């Protein structure tokens, strides 16, 4: 970025500068600021309770990682190249569309 000055330093150097009073952040000013107080008028601006925050964290933790896939099973199967190319040409979601096409075929055909 033109005109910007980026510097790099260690945590120890930053602490030493702060102790010498050379810090560029006025920590006392930040700490002295008044905390947010909800006026009770707008429910959307109400700060979350500790329990609500914890519940949100738990939901996030459960959502992390790769989706389980529900009742799906992983397998290896071979299809003709032109069939795969046709489904892939439709863009993202081609495997879901292929699954739907096979399910639709099963409605009119018996595999026994």
Image (cartoon, grey):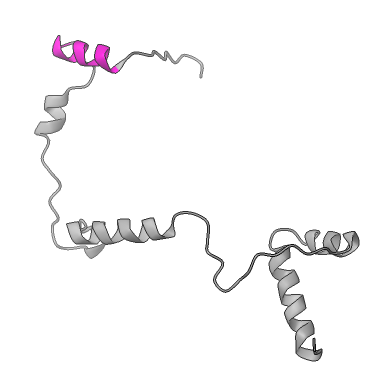
Q: Is residue 98 above or below residue 8?
A: below
Please indicate, yes or no, whether residue 88 appears anywhere in the rendered image: yes
Q: Position of residue 110 (x, y in %)?
A: 80, 90
Q: Is residue 30 above or below residue 77?
A: above
Q: Position of residue 32 (x, y in %)?
A: 9, 32
Q: Is residue 37 above or below residue 1?
A: below
Please indicate, yes or no, whether residue 49 appears anywhere in the rendered image: no
Q: Is residue 86 magenta?
A: no
Residue visible at 31% across and 56% down in the picture? 57
Q: Which residues are magenta?
A: 11-21
Q: Which quadrant of the view contains residue 22?
A: top left
Prevailing secondary structure of the magenta residues: helix
Total count of labels = 0
Q: Quadrant of the C terminus?
A: bottom right
Residue visible at 53% across and 64% down in the picture? 68
Residue visible at 28% across and 18% down in the picture? 11
Is 61 left or right of 110, judged from the image as shown? Answer: left
Q: Is residue 20 magenta?
A: yes
Q: Nearer the viewer, residue 69 or 91?
A: 69
Q: Residue furthest front?
A: 112
Residue visible at 16% across and 30% down in the picture? 30
Q: Which quadrant of the view contains residue 103?
A: bottom right
Q: Is residue 50 above or below residue 6?
A: below
Q: Position of residue 106 (x, y in %)?
A: 76, 85
Q: Which quadrant of the view contains residue 61?
A: bottom left
């Amino acid at each position: 970025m033109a005109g910007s000055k980026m510097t790099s330093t260690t945590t120890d150097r930053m602490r030493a500068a702060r102790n010498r009073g050379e810090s560029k952040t006025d920590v006392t000013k930040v700490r002295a600021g008044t905390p947010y107080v909800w006026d009770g008028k707008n429910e959307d601006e109400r700060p979350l309770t500790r329990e609500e925050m914890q519940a949100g964290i738990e939901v996030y933790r459960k959502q992390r990682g790769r989706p389980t896939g529900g009742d799906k099973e992983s397998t290896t199967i071979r299809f003709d190249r032109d069939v795969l190319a046709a489904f892939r040409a439709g863009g993202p979601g081609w495997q879901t569309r292929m699954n739907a096409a096979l399910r639709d075929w099963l409605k009119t055909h018996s595999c026994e």
